Image (spheres, helix red, strand yellow):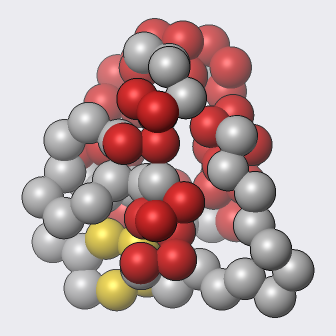
Amino acid sequence: MGSFGRDFRSGGACGEGGGADPSRIAAGLSQKELAAKLGLKPQQIQRYEAGNYQGATSLGRVNPILRALGVKLRPGAELRLVS
């Protein structure tokens, strides 16, 4: 199962193997709170985390998640999907 590349993970998406998102935890948010910020159901956040955010591959979905977590991308930052 793939995951986002190191650039995204170090900003905090899930690491290898799924599970709790370190960025979400560092931001002090529960899955329910993050879901509310994004207008999603907590089950969707669970699915994203379990699948290393594979289901959130469009920039239109990733950008709000990053903002909700307080992660800022530098100009020219690259998000790569790796397997």
Q: Residue 39's spot in the image, x, y percent?
A: 67, 20
**26 up-or-down from 3: above or below:** above
In-image side of 71 versus 57 (left or right): right
**29 up-or-down from 26: above or below:** above
Quadrant (top left/top right/bottom left/bottom right) for the C terminus: bottom left
Q: Quadrant of residue 45?
A: top left
Visible in this render: residue 51? yes
Visible in this render: residue 35? no
Total residue callouts: 0
For the point 87% across and 80% down, which residue is it? 75
- Considering every residue shown, the one lying at the far right of the view is 75
For the point 63% across and 66% down, which residue is it? 58
Q: In front: 81, or 7?
A: 7
For the point 27% across and 60% down, which residue is it? 15
- Considering every residue shown, the one lying at the far front of the view is 26
In-image side of 72 versus 2 (left or right): right
**8 up-or-down from 75: above or below:** above
Quadrant (top left/top right/bottom left/bottom right) for the N terminus: bottom left
Q: Residue 11's spot in the image, x, y percent?
A: 54, 60
In-image side of 35 versus 38 (left or right): left
For the point 42% across and 80% down, which residue is it? 5
Q: Residue 25's spot in the image, x, y percent?
A: 40, 29
